[in-house]
Amino acid sequence: METPARDPQLWRIAKARAKFKSHLFTYFAVNALLWTIWLLTDRHYTHGIPWPVWSTVFWGIGVFMNGVGVYGGFGKMNLSEREYERLLRQRTNQM
């Protein structure tokens, strides 16, 4: 069975989204494990901020920025396309 030809741009987007979903799953799994460890060990002996907060917050910021880049928003592709269209308009106006 022969696979149909892939659109390179769509294939790149699909791979980036699959990688993001894998990263998101890993984020939730690891943080659930860290919070479980904290819950079962020393949460009764320390006061203040629980130590898993740091990995949850800072890694979460990275996952969020990755998601914004992959699913739109401030993605490089949108900026590149807009710049390309602006240059095309400039060139047609000069002619």
Image: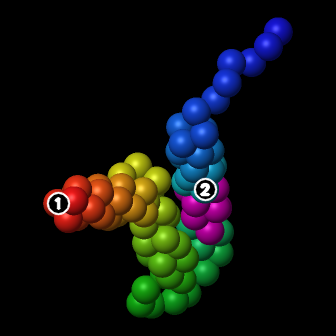
User: What kind of residue is marked 2?
Assistant: His
Residue carrying label 2: 23
Q: Which residues are magenta?
A: 25-34
Q: Residue furthest left?
A: 93
In front: label 2 or label 1: 1
In the rendered structure, the answer to whether residue 56 lies left or right of residue 42 reads left
Q: Does label 2 or label 1 sit earlier along the sequence? A: 2
Q: Residue furthest bottom?
A: 47
Q: Along the line of sight, which residue is nearer the eye, 1 or 48?
A: 1
> Is the residue 43 above or below the residue 46 in the image?
above
Residue carrying label 1: 93
Tell me whether the residue at label 2 lies in contact with that at label 1, contact meaning CB atoms closer than 8 angstroms. Answer: no
Q: In x, y percent, where is residue 34? A: 62, 68
Q: Residue at x 62, y 50 (%)?
A: 19
Specify the color scheme: rainbow
Q: In x, y percent, where is residue 80? A: 39, 61
Residue 52 picture quarter: bottom right
Q: Quadrant of the C terminus?
A: bottom left
User: What kind of residue is marked 1?
Assistant: Asn
Q: Along the line of sight, which residue is nearer the eye, 6 or 57?
A: 6
